Image (tube, rainbow, N blue to C red):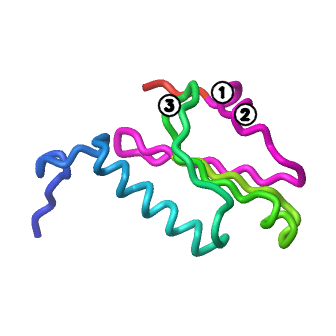
Amino acid sequence: EKVELAEDLGIDFNSQEMQNEFNEMFISTFTSEFGEPESISDSSFNSGNWRWIHYGDSYYAQNGMYVDILTRFYNKTMYSIMLACDSPCDVNAFMNECIITTD
């Protein structure tokens, strides 16, 4: 058996195409677990660009919590953060003040 590294095949994990594929897989996974989100956005924070899935008032009414899920793929690593709160979370403040990455 032969093992080939993605880099040897010319795959750039940081390319926009791969980022889009990762983000679509991410959305499918959480949608199957949590249902349809209130919103999905690509957001820029101090720590970089993240895909943000937000479950708001309708999810809260059914489950008693607000859920925000953020993910970032960078240099072959997936970073993921899930915030589940009994009141809406200030995701922008949390991401900009509490999450620090070094690229």
| Residue 59 image offset from top left, x and y in percent | 78, 66
Q: Residue 54's quadrant in the figure?
A: bottom right
Q: Is residue 84 magenta?
A: yes
Question: Which residue is nearer to you in this view: 103 or 37?
Answer: 37
Q: Is residue 86 left or right of residue 80?
A: right
Q: Residue tagged by mark 3?
A: 48
* Amino acid of disc 2: Phe
Determine whether label 2 and label 3 are within 8 Å by CB.
no
Say what amino acid the circle numbered 3 marks. Answer: Gly
Is 65 colored magenta in this rendering?
no
Residue 13 image offset from top left, x and y in percent: 29, 45
For mark 3, give the secondary structure: strand
In the picture, the quarter occupied by the C terminus is: top left
Residue range of the region highlighted in magenta in the rendering: 72-99
Question: Could you say whether the residue bearing mark 2 is in a helix, strand or loop?
Answer: helix
Return the residue nearer the eye: 51 or 10. 51
Give the residue displayed 58% in from the left and 69% down from the top.
31
- Alpha carbon separation for disc pair 3 and 1: 10 Å
**Tag 2 and tag 1, C-beta contact below 8 Å:** yes
Spatial separation of the CA atoms under disc 2 and disc 3: 13 Å
- Label 2 sits on residue: 94
Distance from the alpha carbon under mark 2 to that under mark 1: 6 Å
